[in-house]
Image (tube, rainbow, N blue to C red):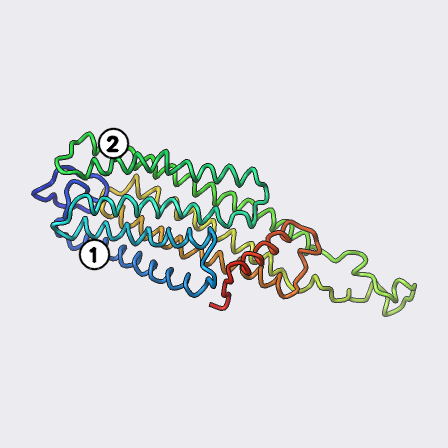
Amino acid sequence: MIPIAPTANTMGRSEYGAGSRLLTFNALVFTVISAFGAVAWYNVLELSLRMYLTFGRRRGLYFWALVVATWGIAVYELGLVLLFFVPNVSWGIYTTFTVFGYAAMVTFQSVVLYSRLHLVVHDPRVLRLILALILATPVLFLIPRAVTEYGANSPGTSGAWLRRFSIADDLQTAVFFLQECLLSGVYVWAALNLLRSVSRGHTAPSPMQLASPKSSNGMSGSGSASNRKPPKSKYDDGPSERKVLLNLVSINVIMVIMNLAVFAVQYTQGDDEIQAALKAMLYSIKLKMEFVVLNQLMVLANANGTGNGRMREKGSGSAALLAQASTDARSSEIRTGC
C-alpha cells in the first residue's frame, strides 16, 4: 500500500478519494497517478486520430462504440483531475464527470466487443442474449453506483453513503469483469471453432488433387504417381487464415488477463486514487488492442477481396467471417493502409 496522509477537511474516503477532496502531496502517489493519467490521455488522443484516419465513413455500431468508449475515458480522467488537483470546484461538477465518464468507459467497452462478435458467432439467439445482458447491466448496476457516488461526494456526507458506494462499486466491477470475460470467452470459443475448420481445410490434398492426368491414364515408371510430387494446388498458398485466427485468439486471451487485472486492482489495492487512475489506463490499452483485432479482421477481408478462396471453397464457417469482414470494410470504407 502507498500511504496517503489525510487532509484537514477529510470526511471519509470512497473511490478516488471522494469526501476527502484534494490529495495531500505525496511525491510517489502523485507520480504514479500522473503517469497512469498521462498514458490514458495519450491513448485517447492516439485512438481519436486512428479512428479519424481509419474509418472513411464514420457510422455504424462499432465506430460509435469506439468513439464513446474512448472519450468516456477522457471525461472520466478530467473528473479525476478536477477531484484530485483543482481547488474550488463544485462537487457536482467533478462527480458528474466521473459518473458519466466511467459509465461510458465500461459500458461501451462491452458494446465494442459485442459489435464485432457477429463476425464469428452466427447464432442469433446467442447474440440476442448477449445484447440483453449488455443493456441490462448498466441499468441494474451503474445506476445504483451513480446514485451512491453522488451521495458519497456530497458535502456533509455520512459514512452510510460511503459504505453504500463501496458495495455498489465492488459489485459493478465484478459484474463487468464477468461480462467482458464472457464476451472474450465466446469470441475465443468461436474463433477456435473456425480455426479447427481451417486446419481441416489445410490437412492434406484430396485424392483428386494428388492424381495427375498421366497417372489416371495408367502410365508408370519414374513419372508414376507414387514418385511424382503432387501438383501445386490453390490450397498451398499458406495458412494465412489460421495465423490470423490464432492472433485473434491470443489478443482476446490478453484482454481477459487485463480484465483480471482491473478486477484484482479493485479488491487488492488499498489506495482508491491509484485504483481509479489505473482503471482508466487499462481501459485505454484495451481499446487500443481493439485496433489490433480490427487489423487482423481486415487481413481476412483483404484475402477475401483479392480472390483467396480457400475457405470459401471448403464451405467452412470461416467463409462467413471472410464475407462479413469484407462487407463491413466496404460499408465503413475502412482504410486498411493506415
Q: Which residue is drawn at 21% across and 56% down?
A: 31
Query: How many other residues sit within 10 Å of disc 1, few (<14), some (14-19) or many (≥20)?
Result: few
Residue ID for mark 2: 164
User: Where is 101 relative to 174, above or below?
Assistant: below
Quarter assignment of residue 324: bottom right
Q: Quick one: quadrant of the N terminus?
A: top left
In terms of depth relative to the viewer, which is nearer, 195 or 157?
Answer: 157
* Front residue of 20 and 142: 142
Left or right placement of residue 48 versus residue 328 in this view = left
Q: What residue lies at 28% left-to-right and 38% top-to-bottom? A: 146
**Where in the figure is residue 78, as x and y percent of width and height?**
24, 53
Is residue 287 left or right of 161 when viewed as pictured?
right
Judge from the rendering whether residue 188 lies leftward or rightward of residue 73; answer left or right. right
Q: Distance of mark 1 from mark 2, alpha carbons?
A: 30 Å
Instruction: First in sequence, mark 1 or 2: give its number.
Output: 1
Which of pointers 1 and 2 indicates the residue nearer the eye? Answer: 2
Q: What element carries label 1?
A: helix
Say which residue appears at 54% left-offset and 39% top-offset.
126
Point out residue 234 in the picture as x, y percentages from the top left corner: 71, 64
Looking at the picture, how far across and down is residue 94, in whole percent? 21, 47
Q: Residues within 10 Å of mark 2 (few under 14, many from 20)?
A: some
- Judge left or right: residue 5 versus residue 310: left
**Dot 1 corresponds to which residue?**
31
Residue 284, x across and y down, in percent = 35, 54
Query: Which amino acid type is marked by label 2?
Result: Arg
- The amino acid at mark 1 is Thr
Mark 2 secondary-structure assignment: helix
